[in-house]
Image: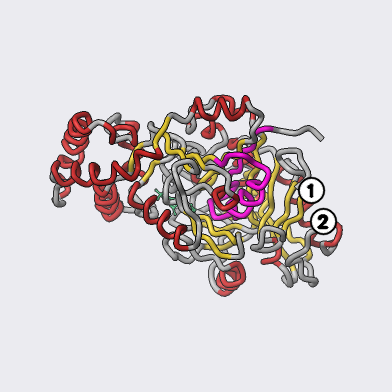
Amino acid sequence: MKTNQQCIVMGAQWGDEGKGKIVDLLAAQADRVIRFNGGNNAGHTLVARGKMWKLNLLPCGLLHGRPGIIGSGVVLNPEALFREMDAVQQQGLDVSPDQLIVSDRTALVLPVHHQVEAAEESRRRRPIGTTLRGIGPAIQDKAGRRAIRAGDLADAALLEERVEDLLSYHNALLTGWGEPTVKKETLLQQLLALAPRLLPYVAAVPPLLEASARTGERLLYEGAQAILLDVDHGTYPYVTSSHTAAAQAALGTGYGAAVQATVLGVCKAYTTRVGNGLFPTELSGPEGDALRERGGEYGVNTGRPRRCGWFDAVTVRAGIRAGGIQSLALTKLDVLDGMVEVKVATGYRFKGQLLKEPPASLSEELNAVYETLPGWRRPTAGIRDFQELPEEARNFVRRIEELVDVPVTMVSTGAHRDDTIVLESPFGVAS
Ligand code: IMP
């Protein structure tokens, strides 16, 4: 078996696929775990060290004692990071600067971003349904070249200039909307107060990753959100503001060699979505409610009930191509246990035509075309060997492979790390 030194784990649907558990499992084989996109809009729930952990910004590998890295592709809310560090410390995990590096190029999410996002969402004719964590405005500031970056906190004079530029933009916007403006002194003092705690973690990431790879260490890149939320390749405009494709692992760390990583997409055996936007296989009414209850489909971050529906092979197939996904980890198979039949969308009917590719805008007139497969009566929960799955469940997995055109190399059958069938490890090593 060929061993691989780098692996990217990313979402293959609209997020919440159970990436946290898969990253946690693979972290045991890795030396460093690296975040490269999103911010604290991400939420990973995982069971480790006999406890339940809820992480938003901290890389999951910390739970295995693997140092974590937050790359420049992440937008970082320092207060949220500190709250999370305090919470995990209470659960017995101390995150010291030798355990976590924050890129000096990471753009910060500031209180003004929350204010601007709330004002914009409330004015949209069709709100996106964002997590209201200030992620979009912070990323816009980065592209607008007015962001405050983690490294800027080390230079008070430079910081003052940058705060002035940032607020000249945002205060004009807030004034136009009739919203309260932000005082330069207030923001500057907030940032200066955060600096002493954040700066010990701040460093340049690319040389570190290069040195780590040269000594033979294994690098695990932990994607946030998912390909259908990618700003270019997702269901625009109901997407996040950053890139979620595997290519972002290279761009969002500054370590270009990340493009050589193997790419594992994580995908539920059905589909969920939070926030607004079209969802062709959505089940409304009692069927959707039943799936939500069985799957515990409520947001980690916001507690919002997730919209639930059947597996959509059309969007997943397109997401695999755009994202660069080479194999899939299929999660929550056990949630479908006991169903008489299970459905998979294989196309869409749109104005009398059969579509095999998702159009640029998912229209309300688009109807999913389903293939129905027999369900399985025996529970799959906790099964760790593929051959022990009921035949119908194995056939379901094999049919998904055919439809999306990549192999399913892992199947998750429960929340615990060990409730996983590993057919092939993305690092090419035995677990
Ligand atoms: P934002 O990332 O907060 O701007 O939200 C944009 C869209 O992405 C909304 O539909 C959110 O619900 C969705 N979103 C953002 N982060 C996640 C996530 O980690 N899981 C699932 N959906 C997410």
What's the distance in space between the residues labelled 1 and 2, CA to CA? 8 Å
Q: Is-magenta flag for residue 209?
A: no
Q: Is residue 52 left or right of residue 4?
A: left
Front position in the image: 217 or 362: 217
Q: Position of residue 336 (x, y in %)?
A: 69, 66
Circle number at residue 386: 2
The stretch in magenta equals 5-33
Residue lying at 56% horizontally and 68% vertically, measured from the top left: 296
- Report the front residue among 402 and 224: 224
Q: With respect to residue 39, does 261 lie above or below?
A: above
Residue for badge 1? 423
- Tag 1's secondary structure? loop
Q: Quadrant of residue 102?
A: top left
Secondary structure found at label 2: helix
Tell me, yes or no, if residue 354 can be seen here: no
**Front-most of residues 86 and 345:** 86
Quick check: can you spot residue 31?
yes
Report the number of numbered marks.
2
Q: Amino acid at mark 1?
A: Leu
Residue 6 belongs to magenta span = yes
The structure residue drawn at horizontal position 43% and vertical position 60%, both measured from the top left corner, is: 87
